[in-house]
Amino acid sequence: MKTLWVALYISLILILAQSCVVAPPSPMVSFGGSRPVGKYVPELTAASGAGLSLSDKPRGSEMAWYSRFRFGITDKMDIGAEAMGFRFQNNLNLSGKISARYSFKPWLRADIGAGMGDNAYGRSVNGDVGITFGTAKDRVWNPYGTLRYGFAYGLKGTGLKPALEGVELGRLLNSHTFMLNVGAEAKLIPYIYFLAELGFGQVFPVGQRNAAIIYLSGGFSFRLPRKKD
């Protein structure tokens, strides 16, 4: 699965690619179409893979993972928790958030999330908003696209472990990120879905040069049968 998944959190590669310390962003991915999971329906998603920072010296992550739990409050709204992490040059990077999604139409959904990040350089508080366009009716393959904006605010701290040699600890650089997620979900058997997603984005560290990122992702979602009202 090494080549199947990375999330926007790959923007932390900019720490090494641009010699600046960027605040860890939230998991800015979609992994699902425009329709929520459904009222009282729990869902568990797991994925893995890799991505690339398109800077002067393109670099990718060694390994990445992502997990998410969601629960339907109504047929139009669900809430959940997301977590992801990856190792890059033996450095562990983690990020998580609480999120909510609301479907205005079967083909139109908005979501918002807030959380925290941690790595070898320090910590951050972060958040993101997004809007997803998908299919109006359920099909074998349901394509979708998401436009997303995220902000990460750097905090002082030692992070998961002491900073790398030559890097001073201090408040990490704030960052703005814009992302386009394009993917599709397909029902394999009842209650099990396959997900594939490709993402392109631009990261703007405050006071530093911006860089583009790209990722390819794949995973599975497991939804339990709908509970009775």
Image (cartoon, rainbow, N blue to C red):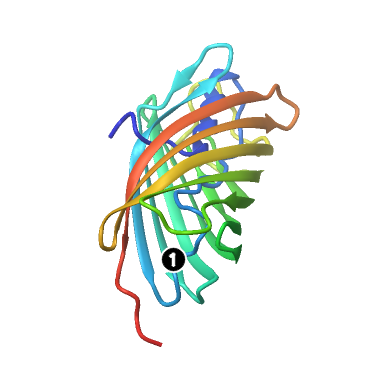
Crowding around mark 1 (Cα neighbors within 10 Å: few <14, some 14 to 19, many 20+) is many
The front one of 105 and 159 is 105
Q: Quadrant of residue 139?
A: bottom left
Q: Residue furthest left?
A: 189
User: Residue 169 in the image: x percent, y percent?
Assistant: 59, 34
Quadrant where the N terminus is found in the figure:
top left
Q: Quadrant of residue 229?
A: bottom left
Residue of label 1 = 37
Residue 96 is left or right of residue 43, and the answer is right
Q: Hey, which residue is sitting farthest top in the picture?
A: 56
Image coordinates for residue 16, horizontal then vertical, percent: 52, 22
Label total for image: 1
Q: Where is residue 110 in the image (x, y as percent from the top left)?
A: 62, 58
89 or 84, which lies in front?
A: 84
Q: What residue appears at the point 35 percent right and 54 percent down from the top-left corner?
A: 45
In the displayed structure, does residue 226 sit left or right of residue 201? Answer: left
The spot of residue 57 in percent (x, y) is 53, 12
Q: Work out whether residue 205 or residue 101 is closer to the camera in this orientation and state it.
A: 101
Q: Which residue lies furthest to the bottom in this view?
A: 229
- Residue 197 lies, with reference to residue 188, above or below; the image says above
Q: Is mark 1 on a helix, strand or loop?
A: loop
Rendered residue at 39%/72% (across/down): 41
